[in-house]
Image (tube, grey):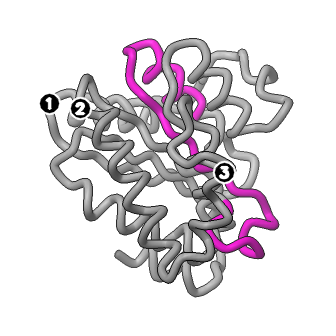
Amino acid sequence: MLADGREARRLGLDALSGKGAGRYHAPIRGRGAETEQIEHGFAAVHAGDQAVTLLSGDPGIGKTRLLQHALDIATDRGWKTMVVAPDVDSPLSPLGAMIGAATRTDPPLVANNDIGPLMQSPAPKYWLTRIIAEGLESMAGGSGALVIVDDLQWLDAGSLGAVSALMHDLQGVPIYWLLATRTGVYSPAPQRFLAR
């Protein structure tokens, strides 16, 4: 989602943790190395570079809380944000996580009534990726943008391909890509993505 200020924080937190977004008000403790890594990513993007950070760990260790921390930093700095937050059923819906993120932007990168024709086009992943890339490039042009991908292990192959293409195509654009995934065995698509 691409949004400003409080609305970005609300939309981002909602996407990251559903309706329970308000449950994370406690300060982060004992995660100095991770928060420092996140700060380095923001600094790199502030200098005009692209940055990528991967948070990987067992379920419940606080990856989503760290993503929310980064979202707070980004909105406090006036950055634009996009949150891709799949759920366990996302692999069953081609491009579902990316469409969800693109329709939650403010304004939406893809309007709901455009999804049907987009998905029926000869190359839906290509066109969705192009639309999102144009929006991200425009939004990052000011101070930078943060793209969060939570629960990467649940992304469908099309959404993983779109994220990979966006990261490649938007090199040189000041975007901080912050990804979180569980450790363990993945389906082939996340394995290929993480091997890059």
Task: Give the CA separation, mark 2 to mark 1.
Answer: 13 Å
- The residue singled out by tag 3 in the image is 100
The picture places residue 127, in percent across and down from the top left corner, at 44, 67
In which quadrant is the C terminus drawn?
Answer: bottom left
What residue type is disc 1 on?
A: Ala
The picture places residue 117, in percent across and down from the top left corner, at 61, 67
Residue 185, compared with residue 113, is above or below; it is: below
Element type where label 2 sits in the image: loop
Q: Is residue 155 magenta?
A: no
Q: Nearer the viewer, residue 27 or 52?
A: 52
The numbered mark at residue 47 is 1
- The mark closer to the camera, 3 or 1, is 3
Q: Position of residue 161 (x, y in %)?
A: 46, 73
Nearest the eye: 105 or 149: 105
Q: Is residue 112 above or below residue 160?
A: above
User: Would you say residue 68 sits in the magenta stretch?
Assistant: yes
Lower sequence index among marks 3 and 1? 1
Magenta region: 67-96
Q: Nearer the viewer, residue 88 or 33?
A: 88
Three-letter code, disc 2: Gly
